[in-house]
């Protein structure tokens, strides 16, 4: 095989209290094509600033080949990204996953998915977006001895994840820099207990339970200040009865519901309570993880 295209789903990390642990794959995708060439690196389909050797798809591609002790050689990479960049929907993880899987497929699938997750987790620093991007569906992960351990959880199929995406970005590094390095025992207990119940509510399709459980004291409290309109949108969403959380490190805000009319209900009021331009994007659970969609 000389050329392969990998499709990777968007992911929402944390799901409220599951900071750096929970993640869910969503129905929005980035496709990346890798074609082995005689020499050099060529990257198309992205801003010129990202078309160099620092490109995440390429760095993951190289990391996998280095692990296999294989020459990187020349490669042409084309990125067809539908996951918005720096918005908390796993755009960086998608590139890492695509690069890792692209290299593995082109060189005969020598590494397992767990092996690819190990490599990319070392690059990203936390597995909460990577795991659902690889496996699909709802996952929870822990890191033990430096290596990620992931479990998939059952998920009711009727949830809608209505993403509210603003017209400004929020780099994850900034969103992490405002977090405290130590937390109180009360806040730790709050998140452990709420996290366990979030997983059960998502499995059962219990929106009332999810609305209560999907609350957090480890990151959203600190990050809300970075996102103008956060409080107003949270109040608006909660008034509809939907569950609400920050998607990953933000700035996308997520409503989780089974109400097919939520988008219409919010559309009537969103513009009047917000200063920025927020796009509403209805998303659904993607149960399939990253996979090959084309090859030659
Ligand atoms: N768990 C991560 C965070 C997700 O909230 O910072 C973003 O990469």
Image (spheres, rainbow, N blue to C red):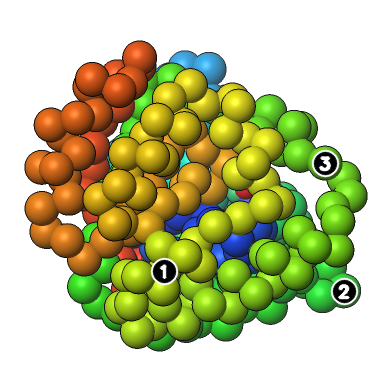
Percent from the top left, x then y, of residue 201? 41, 77
Identify the residue shown where x is 62% and y is 35%. Answer: 223
Which tag is nearer the camera, tag 3 or tag 2?
3
Q: Secondary structure at mark 1?
A: helix
**Which callout, 1 or 2, points at the residue further toward the start of the chain?**
2
147 relative to 4 in the view: left or right:
right
Residue that label 3 marks = 180
Which tag is nearer the camera, tag 1 or tag 3?
1
Query: How far apart are the alpha carbons under marks 1 and 2?
Result: 32 Å
Q: Residues within 10 Å of mark 1 (few under 14, many from 20)?
A: many
| Nearest the eye: 205 or 108 | 205
Q: Is residue 25 visible?
A: yes
**Which callout, 3 or 2, points at the residue further toward the start of the chain?**
2
Locate the C terminus by quadrant.
bottom left
**Which callout, 1 or 3, points at the residue further toward the start of the chain?**
3
Percent from the top left, x then y, of residue 117? 62, 67
Q: Is residue 262 above or below residue 271?
A: below
Identify the residue shown where x is 32% and y is 39%. Answer: 236
Q: Is mark 2 within 8 Å of ligand 1?
A: no
Residue that label 1 marks = 210
Q: Residue 291 falls in which quadrant of the image?
A: bottom left
| Mark 1 touches mark 3? (CB < 8 Å) | no
| Nearest the eye: 155 or 29 | 155
Q: Secondary structure at mark 3?
A: loop
Percent from the top left, x then y, of residue 39? 54, 36
| Mark 3 touches mark 2? (CB < 8 Å) | no
171 relative to 234 in the view: left or right:
right
Q: Residues within 10 Å of mark 2 (few under 14, many from 20)?
A: few
Residue that label 2 marks = 145
């Amino acid at each position: 095989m000389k050329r392969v295209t990998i499709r990777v789903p968007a992911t929402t990390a944390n799901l409220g209290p599951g900071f750096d642990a929970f993640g869910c794959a969503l129905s929005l995708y980035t496709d990346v094509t890798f074609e082995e060439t005689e020499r050099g690196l060529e990257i198309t389909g992205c801003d010129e600033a990202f078309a160099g050797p620092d490109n995440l798809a390429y760095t993951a591609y190289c990391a996998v080949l280095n692990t296999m002790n294989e020459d990187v050689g020349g490669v042409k990479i084309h990125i067809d990204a539908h996951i918005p960049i720096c918005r908390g929907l796993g755009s960086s993880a998608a590139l890492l996953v695509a690069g890792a899987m692209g290299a593995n497929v082109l060189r005969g699938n020598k590494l397992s998915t767990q092996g690819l997750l190990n490599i990319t987790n070392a690059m990203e620093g936390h597995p909460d977006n990577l795991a659902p991007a690889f496996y699909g569906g709802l996952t929870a992960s822990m890191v033990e001895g430096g290596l990620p351990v992931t479990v998939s959880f059952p998920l009711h199929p009727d949830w809608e994840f209505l993403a509210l995406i603003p017209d400004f970005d929020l780099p994850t590094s900034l969103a992490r820099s405002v977090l405290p390095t130590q937390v109180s025992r009360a806040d730790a207990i709050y998140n452990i207990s709420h996290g366990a119940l979030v997983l059960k509510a998502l499995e059962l399709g219990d929106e009332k339970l999810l609305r209560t459980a999907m609350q957090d004291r480890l990151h959203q409290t600190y990050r809300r200040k970075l996102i103008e309109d956060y409080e107003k949108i949270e109040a608006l969403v909660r008034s509809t009865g939907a569950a609400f959380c920050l998607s990953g490190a933000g700035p996308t805000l997520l409503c989780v519901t089974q109400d097919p009319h939520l988008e219409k209900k919010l559309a009537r009021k969103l513009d009047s309570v917000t200063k920025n331009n927020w796009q509403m994007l209805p998303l659904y659970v993607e149960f399939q993880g990253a996979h090959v969609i084309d090859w030659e």
